[in-house]
Image: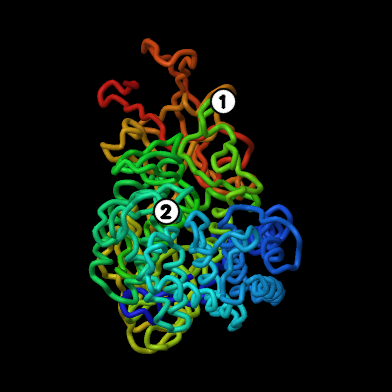
Amino acid sequence: MIDTSQSPHIKLRSIGIGQCRWTEGFWAEKFQQCTEVMVPHMGSLLKGDIGHGLNNFKIAAGLKQGKHQGFAWHDGDFFKWMEAAVYVYAVNKDQAIVDELDQVIEIIGKAQQADGYLHTNIQIDGIKHFSNRKYHEMYNCGHLYTSACVHHRVTGKTNFLEIAIRNADLLYKRFQPQPRELGRFGFNQSQIMGLTELYRTTRDRRYLELAEIFINNRGKYEVVEDSSTEGYPIGDMVQERVPLREETEAVGHAVLALYYYAGAADVYAETGEQALIDALDRLWDNVCNKKMYVTGAVGQAHFGASTRRDKIEEGFLEQYLMPNSTAYNETCANIANAMFNFRMLGIKGEAKYADVMELVAYNSALVGISADGKHYFYANPLRMNKGQREYQDHRDCTESACRKPYIECFCCPPNLVRTIAKLSCWAYSIAKNGVAVNLYGGNRLETKLADGSDLILHQDSAYPWNGNVKITIDSCKDSPFEILVRIPGWADECTLRVNGEDAGVPIIASTYARIERSWQSGDTIELKLPMEVRLMKGHPLIEETRNQTAVKVGPLVYCVESPDLPEDASTLDVYLPSDIQFEKQQDPSLLDGATTLTGEVLLKSDSRDSMYAPMGTPEWTSARVRFVPYYAWSNRGEAEMTVWLPLVWKHPHVGQPC
């Protein structure tokens, strides 16, 4: 969680960790599961012989014999789990969490070398430091810095922070002189975010200087294969063809790109450089308006090429090229999209960024973890069919039909768990003279406004299952201040009342409704959002969604899953009538009580024998079919699924399928 409380170029500042707590409803239940299941279970994996994370530190420290296990970037994934545990402690104040982390930090400290270097794969295997960027040294460093800063902010301890500082000082010593042989390192840009956060924590400006150097190095050097780049794709894959300030499109690996943009946004918040924010505006538009799925997911392909014809993996394709069944949509990329948007929200103060944060949180992020909190998706397609590539398990399990209890490339699971653990930190922001309400759900906020005055309020809501939100002021200052209420982009018609009366302010979708007045204890704000079922369409240039529709209610995207179809029917057989009427149902025994939709669909079974065949005359049948939230699919065994469905328009005169 970033700390922008002192950042000079920010319109909406972050609240403190633990100042907002979910109290009831959707995210309260998820946070409780995060506390009781997700974080402890993941800890048992990473501290044991399945996940290897702690074992690697023990081996590097000389406390255990063995070989390094896992990918080169596994240290960073372990740091993400530690960060998640700290967020949980910030809320529940369970001293056992801090005590356990102290033991882990002691081991990490013993693994760290005298000059500050820390990377278990390289230390254990005797590889030369900073010899090849494929080892992701900067990625591990970045997550070390972020986790250590969060740990210090919440616990007040310096044991983890001191490890991070020693490592960052080494990085500064090696990279600040900008030797040519290291100029193309740092492509996995978590270190930019981490260094900026370390600057915010220590106020040592060297770390901000180094973060900016890593930005400036991209696109600065000739893109040719050399000894430092062998073993990993070059060029657009790692965003090194074009300097950031000149770039016009999101290219390459989606996580690398969005970590890069998020880091640049952090640097802008401290420096205010206009060229940086101009570039980020262009890139945000390219990502969110031309390369993002209806679920908020990004990264269209596992393998492919950039528009400049560089080989790419797990990344962006051309704009409006949006495959469904072969969509990759790495969980980490989706989360990185939300991270980038959270930073842009702070800089710009515009609700459209919170819209994307919310869309990702409920859909393309949450789908990455099972209902039991113990199984994980890495890739998140929008369609899963029998007989296609994604229905088979691949070697590394990044593409699979069911969530896995452990994925060898373990970057996504701890990233998602730490996001769920810290999501309450995104629910509110501090404005110049007031507070912004970014996310909805039952919660309690105890914070300080920009002038240092105390503010306590609570929110009552069963969101996203219904659109009624009630905010009650419990304690505040006497002088007037603003409460900024986000009107979601999908909320074309809604009502906003203060103490039962019309709020008397403009209510425009994808903006903040600004209510300024002298507030007092007991005052209420009531927001009523429309939660009708909507049939969505894609941009005309998205070939993969032509003549198809997706079902959405509020922020939730729905899908059809084969367990809810008639026997022997496939998701490929389902067609949606344009005049379909849905019935909402809530079954506590199904998918943790999620609201489902039931409606009459048309079924048309097609032969699977030949690749092409004459059209013939279709034979239609109908069936009442249940739709489930996209995040909840694949919790009832191996299944087919689709978000987009072919649409059958009712003829305006005859009333029959066309």
The foreground one among 443 and 360 is: 360
The amino acid type, in three-letter code, at marker 1 is Pro
Residue 175 in the figure: left or right of residue 372: left
Label 2 packing within 10 angstroms: few (<14), some (14-19), many (20+): many
Q: Is residue 452 above or below residue 320?
A: below
Check disc 1 and report its element: helix, strand or loop.
Answer: loop
Q: Which residue is denoted by mark 2 in the rendering?
A: 359
User: Residue at position x 38%, y 55% from top?
Assistant: 257
Residue 171 on image: x %, y %: 47, 72
Q: In the image, which disc is placed on residue 566?
A: 1
User: Residue at position x 56%, y 75% from top?
Assistant: 116
Q: Is residue 654 above or below residue 643?
A: above
Quadrant hosting residue 654: top left
Residue 52 in the figure: left or right of residue 514: right
Residue 216 on image: x %, y %: 32, 66
Quadrant hosting residue 393: top right
Mark positioned earlier in the residue sequence (1 or 2): 2
Mark yes or no: residue 592 visible. Answer: yes
Q: Are marks 1 and 2 in contact (CB under 8 Å)?
A: no
The foreground one among 448 and 254 is: 254
Mark yes or no: residue 344 visible. Answer: no
Quadrant hosting residue 179: bottom left
Label 1 packing within 10 angstroms: few (<14), some (14-19), many (20+): few
User: Residue at position x 59%, y 75% from top?
Assistant: 90
The foreground one among 487 and 276 is: 276
- Location of the C terminus (image quadrant): top left
Q: In the image, which disc is placed on residue 57?
A: none
The amino acid type, in three-letter code, at marker 2 is Leu
Residue 213 on image: x %, y %: 36, 70
**Front disc: 1 or 2:** 2
